[in-house]
Amino acid sequence: MSATHKRFVAILWTMFCLPTILQSPSAAQTARGADIAVVVHPDTPIDDLSLAEVRRVLLGDRQYWNSKLPVVLLIRAPVARERDVVLRVIYQMTETQFKQFWIAKIFRAEAASQPKIVYSNDMQYELVSAIPGAIAFVDAHNVRPGLKVLRIDGHFPGDHDYPLR
Amino acid sequence: MHRQLLVIAVLFLATGSAWGQSPPLPDQTEQVRVLLERVGQLEKRVAELEAKQGVSPTPILTAAERTPVQKSESQGTTASPGTAHDQMAQEQAVAQQAEVHYPSLQVRGFADIDFSATDQKGTTSGFNLGQLDLHLASPLSRKISYFGEMTFNAHANGYTVEVERSIIRYDYNDYFKLSFGRYHTPIGYWNTAFHHGAWLQTTIDRPEIVRVGGTFIPVHFVGFLAEGNIPSGGAGLSYSFGLGNGRGEIISRPGDAGDINNNRAWVANIFARPAKLYGLQLGASVYRDKITCQNNPIVPAVPGCRLTNGNDYREWITAAHVVWTKGAPEFLAEFANVNHHQVLTNLVSNSQGLYVQLGYRLPWSEKTLKPYYRFEYLHTPQSEAVLPNLDLVESIAGLRYDISSYAAFKGEYRHASRDILKTPTFNGIVNGLFLQTSFTF
């Protein structure tokens, strides 16, 4: 190994270790609030998903509920708490990373369009009701009759071990 | 030379740091949050009032099924004019979101502007336009989509336009998707993860083994591709299998206008994204082709076989990759072996190429800074008859700064040793500074 390569290794070591030591969870990362329910169109042939399966759906790795019913992703606009929880718990991305992820996804021809953006709970409710295959994330206090609430990892919103909060 | 590089590097980093200190407009964010909370409270209040008045929940209707009569009834009984207007606006928004039009063309562009300066004798420093890249995506129906990619490339005497990808895909379900067209060959990871938009990749350039216009692996492929998920539980397996024309007469290009021999190339790729290790991808690929080296002479700008003897060669490419894509850290490692077997004489050669790239999105400045390092190695033996001499050992250290969600600055220092540059008076080692701003629009 030449001297130049040794210098590179030393720089790398510093570059990777220092941030890890200094990094601590921010307030946003530790904040806790109401559970976020995963709701789908009532005709969707699914009742429960694991968190990993929800992640596959949101990452666009699973695009069909069955061969006739495509998944339609609905995601709240930025700053809504539902979106914050989805980005933090499921995507584990910042807002910028999330935008970049979907641009790259379409660019790779792995998806034809981005998730639909919704601006209010009413709009979200009506879209999930109207679009077969739609899936959305709603504050558990605002869930209305007529939608199907999915169990996540075997738990409903409000259960102690419910993962989306 | 070194002083110039130092000054440019300092300027670049200082600009980046200054930009990184711009405040993210907390007032606006807070206002939006307050307004959204207010909207949520009002929606809750409306729901409570509707419940008290015995109004049944909104029936499940599509936007198209909502008739003007229903709207006027609701306006006349429960809503004030202002509320009715808001409700109509919302219904319009819902109807627009629910409707899907085919075809639905989306266009996105990528571009980059670069600066380079090296200590290689005979080269000049300066700016250059990178690729202007247009990406088209258009769903043609619920299960059929078109994807296209075109680049505009600056050359000394003008521009060239290249159709990089043109794909029509039919999705049967998650397990089987069939497409036809011109692809980036699914060998390894990088070639199908980043394509031509420099903004998408952490570094300024692609690794040498997948360099666009390079010869180590066939970057493009014309034919058909079947791909999908494999039912595998938490292993998250996916596959792709393709059949196509393989390398053309110019071995860096596919046979766009037809194959040069009567032998199809095939490629198979399998990878896993384990559910419990979100961010990890492991994969392996094989590629098989027959290359016919033509008897025409090599033009330097148009790479053909190293030996233009008219012989046929069987090509086996095997590749494997491990990547961790979450950014903190980012880890990409890829290895490929290119085996050429001369049909006539049974002579065999193996060329190897690899890269390892590490990056780390720093927690400060809203995670906009990402230092990175990449090591690259390529070896083509003397017995290699198809590929040119690609021997390379290179280290790249750089910093990427995301100036916004859609634009980035990158700065790199490279230290490369290229066998082909070696002369009795030059050891083939080149140092250089490279800068780039890349963006999408």
Image (tube, coloured by chain):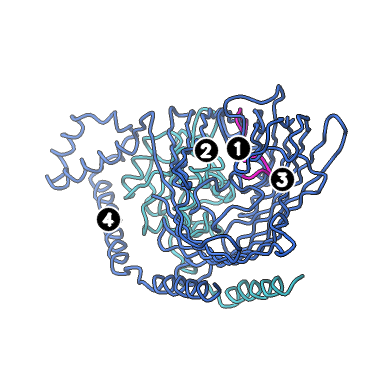
Chain colours: A cyan, B blue
What residue type is disc 3 on?
A: Pro
Q: Residue under mark 3: which chain is it in?
A: B
Coordinates of residue A77 in the picture (x, y in percent): 36, 52
**Tag nearer the camera, 2 or 4:** 2
User: What's the magenta region?
Assistant: B214-227
Which is more N-terminal, label 1 or label 4?
Answer: 4
Q: Nearer the viewer, residue B317 or B393?
A: B393
Q: Quadrant of residue B20?
A: bottom left
Do labels 2 and 1 touch, CB within 8 Å? Answer: yes
| Mark sitting on residue B164 | 2
Do labels 4 and 1 touch, CB within 8 Å? Answer: no
Confirm whether the magenta stretch covers residue A126.
no
Coordinates of residue A50 in the picture (x, y in percent): 59, 48
Which is more N-terminal, label 1 or label 3?
Answer: 1
| Spatial CA span between label 2 and label 4 | 46 Å
Q: Are marks 3 and 1 on the same chain?
A: yes
| Mark sitting on residue B280 | none
Q: Residue under mark 4: which chain is it in?
A: B
